Amino acid sequence: MESLVRDTIESRVHSVLAKIRSATEKAGRPAVSVRLVAATKTVAIPQIMEGVQAGLSILGENRVQEALAKVPALKQGLVQWHFIGQLQRRKVRSVIGLFDLIHSVDSLELAREIDRRAGDAGHRQDVLLEINIGNEPTKAGFLPEQVRQAMPEMACLSYVRIRGLMAIPPPTADPDSARPYFRKLNELARMIDAQHFPSVKMEELSMGMSGDYEVAIEEGATLVRVGTAIFGARHV
Ligand SMILES: *Cc1c(COP(=O)(O)O)cnc(C)c1O
């Protein structure tokens, strides 16, 4: 049967926001506890604008070069930008002040470099620590056992404010198979909280993408990063 609703960016934004609301409610969590980060890699500015007009308020970019062009064009009103891609140390200087949150701090060296550059700019940078939750050899991120060892030093960095964890679980055939990874990330956050570093608060769990964000919400996600379900398949 042909759908009566036209398939547009606007209709997809509304549909994703509605699914987030219902998954949040089903999980017995307050509506404000989950926010949508629209992943905008390879998406052109007019399309992103369409999404913002439809109700997107947080945009997530993966590549520094792309972000440098997009952020100034779209940084208006209540729109927030987050950095969600792999961040090279030599690019850190150009991202300080550009992003409200960096989701992808994947090493102690990167955390130190952000601290140094943010310090130079007199700016405190909010970050999440990226965890290689499936222990995949080719994937970036702290291994779960590494992060707890690195915490004491990271917690002492003056200009890096650690607000939570992020993960991209191994690809799974169905959303429910991602659940154990989401649960494990949540448990890791609770363990870090139990270490009681005064400067560290595990308030955010960035997990869940187009295929599995509803399951991630059931397991405690506070930020879901969704691209394809809003902007369509990427061709680049
Ligand atoms: C592209 C991307 C997403 C969104 O993925 P979709 O499957 O298109 O929703 C989420 N997180 C990161 C880090 C990404 O690079």
Image (cartoon, grey):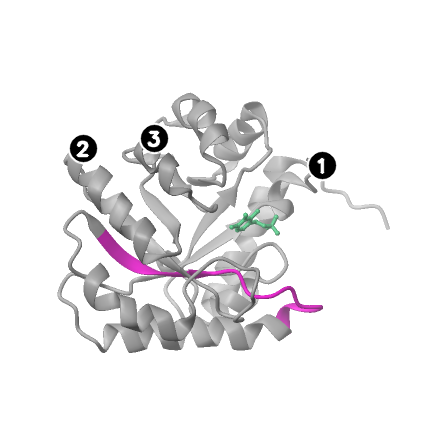
Task: Indicate the amino acid at tag 3.
Answer: Ser
Residue at image point 17% right, 54% down? 157
Q: Is residue 127 visible?
A: no
Position of the C terminus by quadrant = top right
Residue in front for this viewpoint, 119 or 56: 119
> Residue most toward the right?
1
The span from disc 2 to disc 3 (Cα, nearest Å) is 11 Å
Labels 2, 1: front one: 2
Residue marked by disc 3: 94
Query: Viewed as shown, does residue 154 lie left or right of 94?
Result: left
Above-or-below relation of 120 to 221: above
Label 2: how many Cα within 10 Å (few below 14, some 14–19, many 20+) = few
Residue at image point 54% right, 34% down? 51
The span from disc 3 to disc 1 (Cα, nearest Å) is 27 Å
Q: Which residues are magenta?
A: 161-176
How far across and how far down the image is residue 145, in percent?
38, 75
Label drawn at residue 235: 1
Label 3: how many Cα within 10 Å (few below 14, some 14–19, many 20+) = few
Secondary structure of the residue carrying numbered label 1: loop
Q: Is residue 141 visible?
A: yes
Task: Place residue 41 in its image quadrant.
Answer: top right
Residue in front for this viewpoint, 132 or 190: 132
Q: Are marks 3 and 1 in contact (CB under 8 Å)?
A: no
How far across and how far down the image is residue 70, in percent?
46, 26
Residue marked by disc 2: 121
Task: Indicate the amino acid at tag 1.
Answer: His
